[in-house]
Image (spheres, helix red, strand yellow):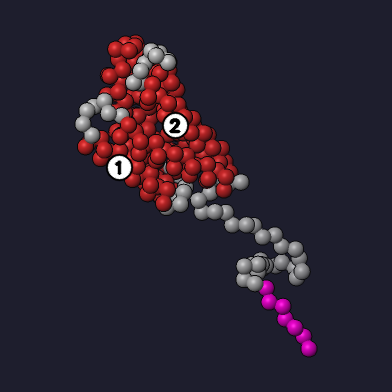
Amino acid sequence: MSTTTSVPPSTALPPAPAGTAPGAPRTVTPRRSRHAVRPRSAGTARIAAVALVTLLALTIPAVPLLDTPGAAVSSLDIAVSFVLVAALQVVVARGIYLLARQRAHPAAYAALLSRVGHAMLLAVAAGLLAVKGVDGVDGFRADWRTALLVLAVHLVVAAVALWRARLAPRAVPVAVAVGGAASLVLAAVTPGQEAILPVLAPLLVADALLAVALLRSAALSR
C-alpha cells in the first residue's frame, strides 16, 4: 500500500518551467519585500538616511545655544553648524528624489524643490548670523522659522512621494505628513516670529521617522 507525503503550502515549490527535465534541480528565488529598494538604490537610501541623522544631531543642540550665544560657543560656530545642516538637507532631498521619482515623479520633484528651498533659506540665514554676530540672533530665529515652514510643506509632499513609491509601510508616510501639518498649525497658533521649538519639534520627529524608513528600505534590499 502506497503512501503520499503532502508538502505544506508554505514550502511547496512552484511548478517547473516547460521543458524542464524531470528530477532536474530547481532554484527558488526568494520574494523581495514590497518596501525594499533596488540594490543600486540601496546606497542612495543609506546616504540620505545618514545625512538625515547627522543633520538632526547638529540641529537639536543648536536650539538652546541660540539663547546664550557667546557663552559656550560663538554665533559664528552656530552659523557654521547650520551651513552644514543646509548642505546635508540637499543630500537628503536628492536621495528622496532619486528613490521616489520612478513611481511618484511629480511628488518626488516637488519634495526635491521644497527641501532644497529650505536649505537655501537656512544657508542665507546662517550667513547673516555669521556677519552680524550676536546682534543677528533674533533675526536668525525669525528667518529660521520661515525656513522651517518650507520644511513642513516639504514633509507633507515627501509623505505623498513615500506613499506612492511604496518606500515604507503606510503608517510612516502618514506620520510624516502629520508631523509636517502639525508644524504648520503650531506656527499659526504660536505668537511671535522667534518661537522656534513649537514649530521645530514635530519636524524633528517626522525627519527621524523618515530616516528610519530610509534605513529600513536599504536593509531590506540586501
Disc 2 marks which residue?
Answer: 56
Q: Position of residue 182 (x, y in %)?
A: 30, 42
CA–CA distance in space, label 2 to label 1:
19 Å
Range covered by the magenta-colored residues: 1-7
Say if the magenta span includes residue 100.
no
Count the marks: 2
Q: Quick one: quadrant of the N terminus?
A: bottom right
Residue 101 visible, this angle = yes
Callout 2: helix, strand or loop?
helix
Residue 92: quadrant of the picture: top left
Which residue is found at the position 37% from the left and 26% from the top? 63
Which residue is found at the position 33% from the left and 45% from the top? 178
Q: Position of residue 76 (x, y in %)?
A: 40, 13
Answer above or below: position of 37 versus 93: below
Q: Position of residue 54 (x, y in %)?
A: 49, 30
Tag 1: Cα neighbours inside 10 Å, few (<14), some, or many (≥20)?
A: some
Callout 1: helix, strand or loop?
helix
Q: Which mark is residue 97?
A: none
Majority secondary structure in the magenta region: loop
Disc 1 marks which residue?
Answer: 181
Closest to the observer: 129 or 75? 75
Which residue is found at the position 25% from the left and 40% from the top? 185
Tag 2: Cα neighbours inside 10 Å, few (<14), some, or many (≥20)?
A: some
Q: Is residue 221 left or right of residue 54?
A: right
Closest to the observer: 126 or 197? 197
Going by the numbered disc 1, the residue's amino acid type is Ala
Going by the numbered disc 2, the residue's amino acid type is Leu
Say if the magenta span includes residue 3.
yes
